[in-house]
Image: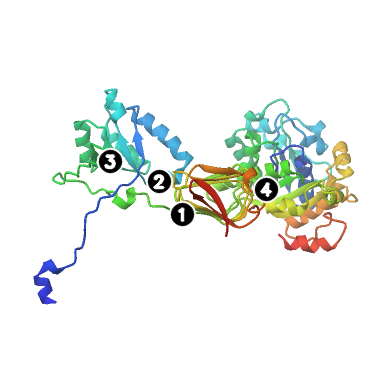
Amino acid sequence: MARIIVVTSGKGGVGKTTTSAAIAMGLAKRGHKTAVIDFDVGLRNLDLIMGCERRVVYDFVNVINGEATLNQALIRDKNCNQLYILPASQTRDKDALSQEGVGRILDELKKDFKYIVCDSPAGIERGAFLAMYYADDAFIVTNPEVSSVRDSDRMLGILSSKSRRAEHNEEPIKEYLLLTRYSPERVKLGEMLSVDDVQEILSLHLLGVIPESKSVLNASNSGTPVILDEKSDAGQAYADVIARYLGEDRPHRFIDEKKGLFGKLFGSK
Amino acid sequence: MPTDSQHSNYHPPALEFKSTTFSAPVLVLANNDVIIIEHQLQEKIQLAPEFFKNSPVVIDLQELNKQKLDIDINELVNMLHSLDFLPIGIRGATTQQLNKALDLSIPAHTGQNQALLIDNTKPQPAKPIPTAEDSASPERTTLIIQPIRSGQRIYAHGDLIVLAQVSAGAEILAEGNIHVYGSLRGRALAGVQGNIEARIFCSDLQAELISIAGTYKISEDLTEMVRNRPVQICLQNNTLTIKDL
C-alpha cells in the first residue's frame, strides 16, 4: 500500500526541501519506488536541489489541468532509477492547485509508487494545506528555536483537524519530528533549544536530529541530495532517519558529543 | 396489601408538577426565505456540528411579523428537523402561524413564561416531543485526549477535561469547569456563559491567560509562586484566586 508523506513545518527556511529531497532519495535507494512532488508552486526549488532543473518540460500544474500526462511530467532521477520528481510550476501561483486535481494525481501515483513525498511550501495557506490534506505520514521539520517550534505546533493542529483523515474520522496522520540545523555546541551555550526543550512543547516521535552542516549547502549548490554524501554528518543523519522510518532501531548520533545522553533520549519517546 | 389497593389514596404520589426555567437557543428570523435560512444555518452548524446536533430551538417570528412577512411554518419546521434541530416552541407568531405550529406539536410561547399546551384533540402523527430534560441541554463533559495545538480552539458546553497539553496559542473555553492534566500553556476560559462557580484545575500552570466568567489574569500577572505548579483557580469576591492543589 502506497504511503503519502508530507514534509511540512509552517515556518520557511527550516529545511523542508532539503529534507524532502534527502528522504525521497533515501527511500528510493532502499529500493522503494518513490515520487517526490514540489507543492511550492510559483517558487520552485525542489528541482534545483535534485539537480534536474534543466530537464523540466511539464510540471504539476500542467498535469492537474490535463495539459500533460503524469508520465510526461515525471522526471526520473539521474542517480537512482527508483526516484521520480514532479516539479512545481514557476509561472503559476498556488491557486492553480485544486483539491480535487491534487487528489486525482495522488491516486494515480499510488498505483505505481510505494512512497509519495510531498514537499510543502511554507505557511499555512492553500499550498501547504493541499500538500498535507491527503497525507498518511507527516514529517515535521523544526529548527531548535522558539518561532519554528511554535509554527510546527500550529501545523500539527492543522494536521489533526483539517486533513482528509481527520475529516473522515480515520486513523490520524502519523506525525514525526525532524529537528534540523541542530548544533550541540550552541545548545550547550544556551543559544539554541535542546532536543528536550523542543520535545517538551511538541512531544512527538523523534525521527532524527540533523546537525547544522556545511555539507547541506554544498549538496544544494551541486544539486545532489545530501543523503548521497555518505561521509557527511548530515547525510548519515538522514540515512538514520530513513532507517528509523522503516522500523529499524538506530541510536541518535548527533545530539551531543557525549554518548551517555543517547540512551536517555531514546527512552523519552 | 389488599386494603391498600382498595384505598388508592394511600399510594405515594407517582408524579408531581414543578415549575422550572431552562435556557434554550432562540432562532430569531429576519428573512422569510426558508432556503436562505437553511443555507445560513448550515454555515453556523459547520462551525460547531456537535453543538447544534439535536439542539432544542425556539422559533422567534417577532421581527418577521413586524415587517409583515409571512413564513411557511411547515416548511420551516421540516427544514429545522432535517438539520437535526428540535423545535420546542414558537413565539411572536400570528394566530394563524400559531395554529400551524400547534398542528406540528410545537407549543406556543405567547408571553415570557406562559406556554400553551398542545391541543390533544387533534389527531397527531407520532412525533418525538422533546422532554423537559432534552430542552435543558444537559451539561455534557467534553474529554480531549490529543494535545491541543497552537491555533486550535475548543469549546465545551459543560465541563472540559484535557488529558494532554494545551499549547501556547491554543484556546480552550468551557461553560463549566476546566481540567488540564498536561501542561497548560495556552488560554483557558471557564464559565464563559457567566458561571462564577466554575473553576480551572491544572497540573502545570504556564497559561497565557486564565479567565473565569470574564474575570481574567494574563501570564504576566502570574507569580513565580504558582507558575509551573499544580493549581486550582476560582473566583472569590470577584477576584481570581489561584491556590495550590
Q: CA distance from mark 3 to mark 2?
A: 17 Å
Visible in this render: residue A107? no
- Element on which disc 4 rests: strand
Mark 4, residue position: A138
Callout 4: few (<14), some (14-19), or many (20+) C-alpha neighbours within 10 Å?
many
Q: CA distance from mark 1 to mark 4?
A: 31 Å
Q: CA distance from mark 4 to mark 2?
A: 32 Å
Q: Residue at coordinates 70% horizontally, 31% vertically from top-left?
A: A41
The image's mark for residue B53 is 2
Q: Are marks 3 and 2 on the same chain?
A: yes
> Which of the marked residues, 3 or 2, is nearer the chain's N terminus?
2
Of residues A11 and A173, the one drawn nearer to the viewer in this rendering: A11
Q: Quadrant of residue A66?
A: top right
Q: Given contact means CB atoms under 8 Å apart, are the residues at marks 4 and 3 in contact?
A: no
Q: Residue at coordinates 55% horizontally, 43% vertically from top-left?
A: B216
Q: In which chain is the residue bearing label 4?
A: A
Going by the numbered disc 4, the residue's amino acid type is Ala
Mark 3, residue position: B89
- Closest to the camera, between mark 1 and mark 2, is 1
Q: Given contact means CB atoms under 8 Å apart, are the residues at marks 1 and 3 in contact?
A: no
Q: CA distance from mark 1 to mark 3?
A: 27 Å
Q: Is residue B226 left or right of residue B142?
A: right
Residue at the extreme top: B67
Q: Position of residue A53 (x, y in %)?
A: 81, 33
- Element on which disc 3 rests: strand
Q: Position of residue B104 (x, y in %)?
A: 23, 41
Q: Are marks 4 and 2 on the same chain?
A: no
Q: Given contact means CB atoms under 8 Å apart, are the residues at marks 4 and 2 in contact?
A: no
- Image label count: 4
Going by the numbered disc 1, the residue's amino acid type is Thr
Mark 1, residue position: B141
